[in-house]
Structures are given as C-alpha cells and as structure tokens.
Image (spheres, rainbow, N blue to C red):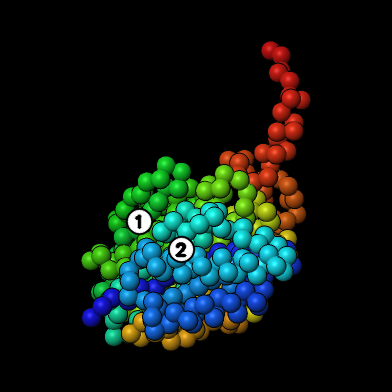
Amino acid sequence: MSKTTVSVIKADVGSFPGHSRTHPKLLEKAAKLLKEEEGKLLIDSFFTHCGDDLELIMTHTHGVDNKQIHKLAWDVFIECTRIAKNLKLYGAGQDMLADAFSGNVKGMGPGVAEMEFEERGSDPVMIFMADKTEPGAWNFYLYKIFADPFNTPGLVIDPSMHEGFVFEVHDLIEKRKILFRCPEECYSMLAYIGAPSRYVIKHVWKRDGTIAASTSTQRLNMMAGRYVGKDDPVMIVRAQSGFPSMGEVIEPFTIPVLVAGWMRGSHHGPFMPVGLCDANCTRFDGPPRVICFGFQICNGTLIGPADMFDDPGFDRVRQRCNELADVIRAQGPFEPHRLSLEEMEYTTLPGVEKAMKTRWEPIGE
C-alpha cells in the first residue's frame, strides 16, 4: 500500500485591515485551485486561515519536498497575491521572497510542514496553525506532548510509548541539526530548545523511526535580511495508538506561554489558543494566536475538520492570556516585552540606529 503524505503550506499574501485577517476572496481562490487538483495531483485538500495567513492542507502520495506539490502551493499563493494587490490589501505577497518558483518553496518565503506515513487502522492527525509568532513557539508544546509524563501519562502507562521519542532539533543560525533521545537526553535537549529563537524542534519520531510530528522552521527575516513580518509556523502531530492521545496533544495549550512575535514581530506576548471564529489578530496586532484542526486520515482523505480549541475547556487559558497581555503591555518599549537586541536585528530598529550612528561620542577614561 502506498504511503500517505500530509503537506501543510502557508503564506501571508495579503490581509485586511492591516495584519488582521485573510480576505474571503483569497480563501475562495485557494479553494478553487486546490479542488481542481483533487483526484489528480492531490487526494484531498482543505484551506483555512489563521489571522492573516492563508493555510493550505493537502494529502497526496508523492512524498515530502515534492516539486509538483510545492509548485501548486506557489501558484495558489501567486494567484492570491494578484487578488490581494488588486484589492490593495495590506502586505500583499509579503511572504513571497522570490519572483519565480525554483523547485521547492522552502527558502522562498512560505512555511512548510510535511510528513509521509503508512496509515494505521485509525490515524488521527492534529494540524496546528499560528499567527504572529515564530517556529520556536512549538518547542514548549512538543516537549510537553512527547517528553513530559505530567502532561502525557501514556509515557508512563502505555507500553508502546514507554521507550520515549527522538527529537530532531535545528540550529537556525549555524544551519545544523542534532538528534536527542528522550527521556535520557531531556536535560541536554532543554538546554537548547529553551532558546526558541535559535533552536527549533523540526521532527519527532518514535524509536523505530515512525514519524510523530513535523513543524515548519522557515525564518522569514533571516531569509530576507529585513523585517517582512513574523514567520507564523505550522505543525502536524499524529495522535493515538502508539502516540500521545488527542487529549494529551492539546492539553499543553491550557498553559499560557509567552512567545516572540506580536506587534511588528518585535514583542513577546501570550500564545492564545482559539477557535477559527476568533483567529483574527486585533489587539496590538495580536495577541499571537494558534488554532488546531483535527482530522482522521482515511486512504488519504481528510475526515473533518474538528475545531479543537473551539471549546469552553480553553476559556480559562484565554482569560489568563488576556491578563498576561495586560501585564506585559504595560512595559511598553522595554525588554522583556520588546525582544532582545539580537532578535531586533532583523526588524525596523536598525533604521533608527543608523540615523543615530554619527551622534555617539566616546566616553573618556
């Protein structure tokens, strides 16, 4: 039996008003273009948005990094960019860092998370999509899901999970990767992933090599060398039957966590889990949002989605996120609300520093 590939590819191709949400005409165009490929290049597809990001969810049998799949996503984003420019939407095509497709959208602006697997008798898949934050935002949650027995009791009581998981961590500065085997190397891994602006969990596997989770690791500012918006990552997590249960996968999102991004990609803010109806960034262009769609995969068909955070069970964390937003917003332009100087290097701050460069004078001994 051929393997199924799930590809989640996103881009900000224009929004209204400002950085708030995706225009319905862009969603309509994306739906039409994806639907035309179902039964041909694709088995199935789904489209949505999180804040101002257009999200494409596709299933097929062509494996990860497939040129045709990535070209399809690129073409969808290009067509939507044309509409966005005609409507004078904000930031039209801001994630499209190249003029022409070169075989793979990685490094060209859009964010990509993909995984290929043999379907189980029942294969639940959780797809997480975020706005106003960076790829490292997933680090805390992936650790809790796959390495913390206080979150995931299956690590203790399920024999199929008792050996733990393997984490692939990428260094986004030095362009290198390392594998950590948990639980035995958890402390070493935490030394790195606790710095999410540089070290990002890319994949999680079972000990036998079966894929469990995949994330996008594209850093827009590093690719463009300037501020072009935040990276707004996506993530795919498999659940049940040898993996954490659905409830164990989404449980960490009941904890209000501060992540980098928010206003102008330059501030820390609370990562708020919301249903699709609330996936529109407003206050201070935020706070950072995350949605989760749950699907059953059946011979490549997407059964669903279920809007996992559209649930009163997450009302309290949303309230706590708002309280955290009040606290940290009161700090205005001061760190730690504003990002560290190292992270501000790719924002608009260097323009201010350049104007002041000639006015600095040496301090006498």
Question: Which residue is at a point 58% across and 40% down the rendered structure image?
Answer: 342
Q: Amino acid at mark 1?
A: Glu
* Total number of numbered discs in the rendering: 2
Q: Is residue 181 visible?
A: yes
Q: Is residue 171 left or right of residue 356?
A: left
Q: Earlier in the sequence, mark 2 or mark 1?
A: 2
Q: Is residue 258 visible?
A: no
Q: Amino acid at mark 2?
A: Val
Residue behind mark 2: 112
Residue 168 — which label? 1
Residue 141 percent location from the top left of the image: 47, 64
Q: Is residue 109 left or right of residue 152?
A: right
Q: Residues within 10 Å of mark 2 (few under 14, many from 20)?
A: many
Q: Residues within 10 Å of mark 1 (few under 14, many from 20)?
A: some
Circle 2 SS class: strand
Residue 276 — which label? none
Nearest the viewer among 139 and 44 is: 44
Residue 249 percent location from the top left of the image: 44, 73
